[in-house]
Image: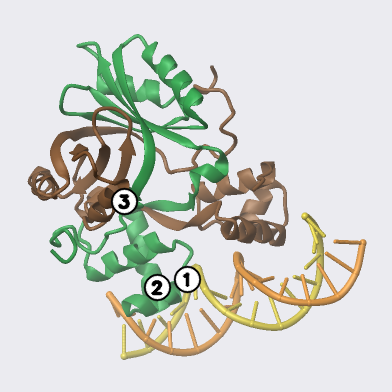
Chain colours: A brown, B green, C yellow, D orange
Amino acid sequence: MELDRLDRDIIAALVEDARATYAEIGHDVGLSASAVKRRVDRLRETGAITGFSARVAPRALGWNTEAYVELFCQGKTKPSDIALAMARYPEVVAAATITGEADALLHIRATDVRHVERVIERIAAETFVVRTKSSIVLSRLVDLPTGAVASDPRNGSPVGG
Amino acid sequence: MELDRLDRDIIAALVEDARATYAEIGHDVGLSASAVKRRVDRLRETGAITGFSARVAPRALGWNTEAYVELFCQGKTKPSDIALAMARYPEVVAAATITGEADALLHIRATDVRHVERVIERIAAETFVVRTKSSIVLSRLVDLPTGAVASDPRNGSPVGG
DNA sequence: CTTGAAACCAATTGTAC
DNA sequence: GTACAATTGGTTTCAAG
């Protein structure tokens, strides 16, 4: 699917504020409200926009601690096995198979360090898990919503360089 | 700040669909539309809800490749130095200081593997960086929006276990 | 593909409980 | 704290370019 400049600008506006009115977005990108709606509908149908979500402060909900956990699995473990198992843990907010020594990397959110420990203990007990290696997050330095730089990935980086 | 069951249910509804009407949310949580609005306004003022964002498919925007990069820094490097430097790279969508051997972990989104390589090269050239260790993401298994499990972090996990 | 108007419906405010 | 009613204003559809 092809996205033109207008589509990208609309997406950028919606990433910044998903509750902006079509008229506001139209004013920003130079389109009428109804034209913006047509494009947003199309972007949703084609899957470029997958939904709209509130951004929440994890700490306000009691999620005070994060950790990253490397997973070392048995030789014959399939990614789908890992996916299925990890989906059962609400604390696992992200997981991916990766290159390198570890087979997968997990991102965990928990109430406190004790909670992280309990979750890792359970994950380590999964049949296909051989070993885990955990890193607790000390402080978050950067946290951008996906698509925050919607303009064009082919732009040079770092900004201004 | 105290969040009751209703607040958590409202947040969960807004994480699922940030463009839901107050009436719809009210129907789900058992409140009138105006009561929901009052609470949403309060949740925004107190910072529990920090905004509303479109969820986008990174691939639709041309971001086809992700990587995690461990950063090993010089002894006297401050977290704020890392934060400041990393904020200049649009490809660095998340960064955190962590426990363990590495000083920080970066999450990078790029167009392709060559793009990842270029970005890491630039980051490795930062004065405070001693060494990097990268893992390319092969496949994403789990990806939840922050606050997807808003009900209560003290709930047992895994679900049903 | 766009705009612009009209009908519809939600957001918001004020009032009462 | 809540619900209800009235006004304001946004969304959505349709005709037309």
User: Residue drawn 21% across and 50% down?
Assistant: A63
Q: Nearer the viewer, residue B75 or B10?
A: B75
Secondary structure at badge 2 equals: helix
Note whether B135 is above or below A23 in the view shown: above
Question: Is B74 situated left or right of B39 in this image?
Answer: left
A64 over B6 or under it: above or below: above
Give the farthest residue toward the front.
A76
Quadrant holding the C terminus of chain A: top right
Q: Residues within 10 Å of mark 1 (few under 14, many from 20)?
A: some
Q: Work out how far the residue at label 2 is from the one at label 1, CA to CA, in angstroms.
A: 6 Å
Residue B27: image location, x then y, percent: 38, 79
Alpha carbon separation for disc pair 1 and 3: 36 Å
Viewer-side label of 3, 2: 3
Q: Which residue is mark 1?
A: B21
Percent x, y of residue A152: 59, 34
What chain does badge 3 belong to?
A
Q: Are marks 2 and 1 in contact (CB under 8 Å)?
A: yes
Q: Amino acid at mark 3?
A: Ser
Q: Nearer the viewer, residue B77 or C6?
A: B77
Q: Which mark is residue A80?
A: 3
Q: Residue D7: where, in percent of width, then height?
A: 59, 78
The amino acid type of the residue labelled 1 equals: Thr
| Residue A103 against residue A26 in the figure, above or below | above
Between the residue at mark 3 and the residue at mark 2, the CA separation in whole angstroms equals: 34 Å
Which residue sits at x=29%, y=13%?
B131
Read off the residue under disc 2. Answer: B25
Front of the two marks 1 and 3: 3
The one nearer the camera, B155 or A81, is A81
Residue pictured at 21% horizontal, 22% vertical: B102
Host chain of mark 2? B
- Quadrant assignment, res D11: bottom right
Amino acid under label 2?
Ile
